Image (cartoon, rainbow, N blue to C red):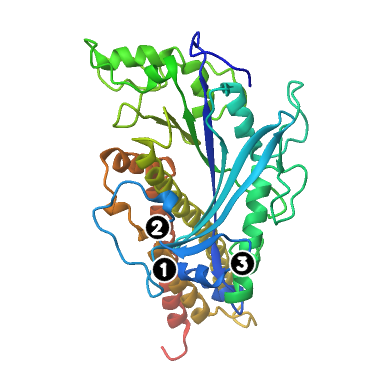
């Protein structure tokens, strides 16, 4: 990364780069059979999953997720905790073949809905750094190891430093780091509380493949002309909104591939795709935030934040809360996706059992009404956790509240929840109708 002055010539680049890859997973207590799954997990189980691999295990939010002072602070204890976390600490690593030194942090958070594992890579801020859109996309593509090179470019890979206590391969991807971190955590949970990874035992999730794509938050630290374009209010202009959009417009072709996670650096943005923030404004990637010093934009795949420094105001207060919101919404999405899948398989078994019982009166496989009733109860108990809102309703900040609503819409949380409730309601009607049919067939009638 060569030295450069602050002149950009319309090219976007940053001096510091941090990327947060947010994965999700669910845990359950090991049952006697698959019909008796305990879907609801107490975050306090983390306190019994201690290991030398973990730097810190505690209830509540880690310090790196505490930003703006909330309106109310709830007590977190073993009897009732909104969340818990396992901090694996930092690792030194190098991105090859470019030999770019990075820091990697791993954080697991346990909510009653589901869990997240956030892998954060950081290229420390330096005046010598000049990370362009192409460099940033290379880092984003570290999510997985490609089978073959594209466009003649050499495959980027992560080499973990020798100082790590864990065993790592010479070539690691972000996903492989997530999977090994998850595996280590689940193994310790299994030893202490007989906890398993939900979806693995019944093969609902294929653990032999890279089975999910993370939500990504990219934080870039800029200076010079780029900082002036993205991080000032243009209050001295007649139309500040239009002036800022024109300044940002020079860099849209560079930041659009990052926001929308394009497979390549060339992505001409369709001018009619984005709506202007004002009726007479210019279309484009406008700022979704409140503070003009902090640029925020989101797609359905990732979020991009541009600031002068992530360690100074307003980023040092905003980023922890924004990451906290992203992790909470991701856990709800993960839980509702799995719940829809579990209900689909339950509905299939309900239909098949009821049909077999109606067709063959003397069938040995009688419809087990008690087992299905218990299944309905366990699913409803699981659904109640989707209403858990660990702290978001006490978070202060107008922009954070609006971004939370945007994230809920992006992950289609309400749509997924309504789909679950409609399926459960339909299953209950089928169950009641079958009970009535059994009663009509009873000789006592």
Q: Quadrant of the N terminus?
A: top right
Provide the residue designation for mark 2. Answer: 422
- Pick the residue in front: 21 or 411: 21
Helix, strand or loop at disc 3? loop
Residue annotated with mark 1: 380
- Can the viewer see residue 271 in this picture? no
Which residue in the structure is indicated by mark 3?
51
Q: Which residue is drawn at 74% across and 23% down?
A: 153
In front of the other: 120 or 193 = 120
The vertical placement of 248 against 436, above or below, is: above
At horizontal 34% and vertical 35% (from top left) the residue drawn is: 313
**311 and 121: which is toward the camera:** 311
> Residue 150's spot in the image, x, y percent?
73, 25
Callout 3 crowding tier (Cα within 10 Å): few <14, some 14–19, many ≥20: few
Q: On the image, which quarter does residue 425 sit in? A: bottom left
What distance separates the C-alpha of mark 2 from that of mark 3?
43 Å
Q: Residues within 10 Å of mark 1 (few under 14, many from 20)?
A: some
Q: Residue at x 47, y 16 (%)?
A: 251
> Looking at the image, is mark 2 or mark 3 nearer the viewer?
3
Callout 2: SS: helix
Percent coordinates x, y for residue 422 in the rendering = 40, 57
Lower position in the chain sequence, tag 1 or tag 2: 1
- For marks 3 and 1, give the CA distance: 34 Å
Q: Describe residue 334's horizontal placement relative to residue 389 as left or right.
A: right
């Amino acid at each position: 990364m060569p030295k450069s002055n602050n002149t950009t010539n319309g090219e976007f680049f940053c001096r510091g780069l941090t990327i947060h890859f947010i994965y999700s997973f669910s845990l359950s207590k090991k049952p006697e059979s698959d019909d008796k799954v305990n879907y609801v997990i107490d975050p306090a189980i983390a306190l019994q999953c201690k290991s030398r691999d973990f730097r810190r295990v505690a209830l509540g939010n880690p310090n790196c997720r505490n930003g703006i002072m909330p309106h109310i602070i709830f007590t977190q204890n073993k009897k009732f905790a909104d969340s818990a976390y396992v901090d694996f600490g930092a690792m030194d690593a190098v991105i090859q073949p470019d030999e770019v030194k990075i820091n990697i942090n791993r954080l697991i958070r346990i909510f009653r809905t589901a869990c997240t594992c956030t892998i954060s890579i950081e290229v420390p801020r330096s005046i010598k750094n000049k990370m362009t859109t192409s460099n940033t996309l290379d880092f984003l593509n570290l999510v997985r190891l490609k089978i073959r090179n594209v466009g003649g470019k050499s495959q980027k890979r992560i080499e973990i430093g020798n100082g790590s206590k864990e065993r790592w391969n010479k070539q690691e991807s972000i996903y492989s780091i997530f999977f090994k971190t998850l595996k280590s955590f689940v193994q310790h949970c299994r030893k202490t509380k007989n906890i398993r990874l939900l979806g693995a035992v019944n093969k609902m999730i294929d653990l032999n493949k890279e089975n999910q794509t993370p939500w990504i938050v990219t934080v870039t630290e800029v200076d010079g002309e780029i900082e002036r374009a993205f991080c000032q209010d243009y209050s001295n202009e007649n139309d500040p909104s239009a002036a800022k959009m024109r300044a940002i417009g020079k860099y849209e072709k560079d930041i659009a591939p990052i926001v929308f996670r394009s497979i390549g650096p060339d992505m001409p943005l369709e001018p009619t795709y984005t709506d202007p923030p004002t009726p007479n404004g210019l279309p484009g990637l406008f700022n979704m935030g409140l503070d003009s010093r902090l640029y925020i934009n989101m797609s359905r795949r990732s979020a991009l934040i541009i600031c002068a420094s992530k360690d100074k105001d307003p980023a040092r207060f905003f980023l922890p809360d924004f990451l906290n919101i992203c992790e909470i919404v991701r856990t709800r999405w993960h839980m509702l996706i799995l719940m829809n899948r579990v209900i689909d398989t339950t509905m299939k078994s309900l239909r098949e059992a009821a049909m077999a019982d109606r067709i063959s009166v003397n069938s040995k496989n009688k419809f087990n009404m008690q087992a299905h009733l218990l299944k309905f109860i366990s699913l409803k108990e699981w659904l109640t956790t989707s209403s858990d809102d660990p702290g978001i309703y006490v978070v202060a900040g107008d922009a954070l509240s609006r971004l939370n609503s945007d994230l809920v819409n992006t992950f289609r949380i309400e749509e997924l929840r309504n789909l679950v409730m409609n399926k459960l309601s339909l299953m209950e009607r089928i169950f009641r109708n079958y009970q009535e049919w059994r009663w009509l067939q009873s000789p006592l009638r």
